[in-house]
């Protein structure tokens, strides 16, 4: 059963070989969450599906994924969105640049611990791709040269909780997210 469209899928042994030699087990399930999807067997026909399972480099994401891409912090995410807009880059461009760094081992994700083969060719679902892109986008945002960011962004002091701060996403204190930089490591109370 496809996790995305909820339609039945054939058993692997009843299928002819795939072109390109991708094993059926890999072509039907996410390499991280192990949920099954039909997209690589035939295009998923759920209207809102952009391709529920694909190689990481070929995953399609909606632009609204950028809204909370940095630590679920709308302010830090807006800084990245503004930077991408200034460069005329889309979320797909961000994905490509992050995957270049992942493939070169400059960037890492928490899933690399269990899946050391995770790279741009790894087959995964949209949900797992977005989770990993969020971690990669944090590193991308951290690596943007200060000279390429507005003074209002670079003049903020680092929050002493850094990326682990719980207040940055608290709806009752939205000013904390804008007053302090959270694209940094925790410096106190470790």
Image (tube, helix red, strand yellow):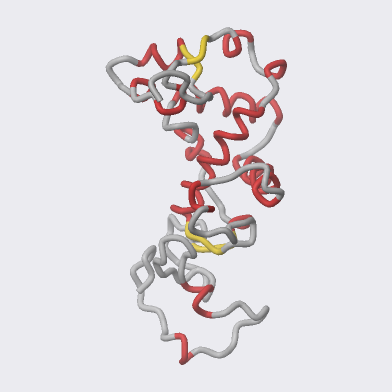
Residue drawn 58% across the image and 45% down it: 108
At 62% from the left and 34% from the top, the residue drawn is: 140
Q: Quadrant of residue 11?
A: bottom left
Name the quadrant of the N terminus.
Answer: bottom left
x and y percentages locating residue 143 in the rendered image? 65, 29
> How many discs appear?
0
Image-based side of 174 in relation to 130, left or right: left
Q: On the rendered structure, is 92 left or right of 163?
A: right
Residue 142, image x, y percentages: 60, 28
Residue drawn at the location 67% of the way across and 48% of the way down: 105
Position above or below: 144 against 31: above
Q: Quadrant of the C terminus?
A: top left
> Is 84 on the left or on the right of 170, as rendered?
right
Identify the image quadrant of residue 17. Answer: bottom right
Relative height, residue 152 to residue 44 (above, below): above
Q: Position of residue 41 (x, y in %)?
A: 52, 76
Establish if 131 lies above or below 4.
above
173 or 10, which is in the foreground? 173
Give the residue drawn at x 52%, y 10%: 157
């Amino acid at each position: 059963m496809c996790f995305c469209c909820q339609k039945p899928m054939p058993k692997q042994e009843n299928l002819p070989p795939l072109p390109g030699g991708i094993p059926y087990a890999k072509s039907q399930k996410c390499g991280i969450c192990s949920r099954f999807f039909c997209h690589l067997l035939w295009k998923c026909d759920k209207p809102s599906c952009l391709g529920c399972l694909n190689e990481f480099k070929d995953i399609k994401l909606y632009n609204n994924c950028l809204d909370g891409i940095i630590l679920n912090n709308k302010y830090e995410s807006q800084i990245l969105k503004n930077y991408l807009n200034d460069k005329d880059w889309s979320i797909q461009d961000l994905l490509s640049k992050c995957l270049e760094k992942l493939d070169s081992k400059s960037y890492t994700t928490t899933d690399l611990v269990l899946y050391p083969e995770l790279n741009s060719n790894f087959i995964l679902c949209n949900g797992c791709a977005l989770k990993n892109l969020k971690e990669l986008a944090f590193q991308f945002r951290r690596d943007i040269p200060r000279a390429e960011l507005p003074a209002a962004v670079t003049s903020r002091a680092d929050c002493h909780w850094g990326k682990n701060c719980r207040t940055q996403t608290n709806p009752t204190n939205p000013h904390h997210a804008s007053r302090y930089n959270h694209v940094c490591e925790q410096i106190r109370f470790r």
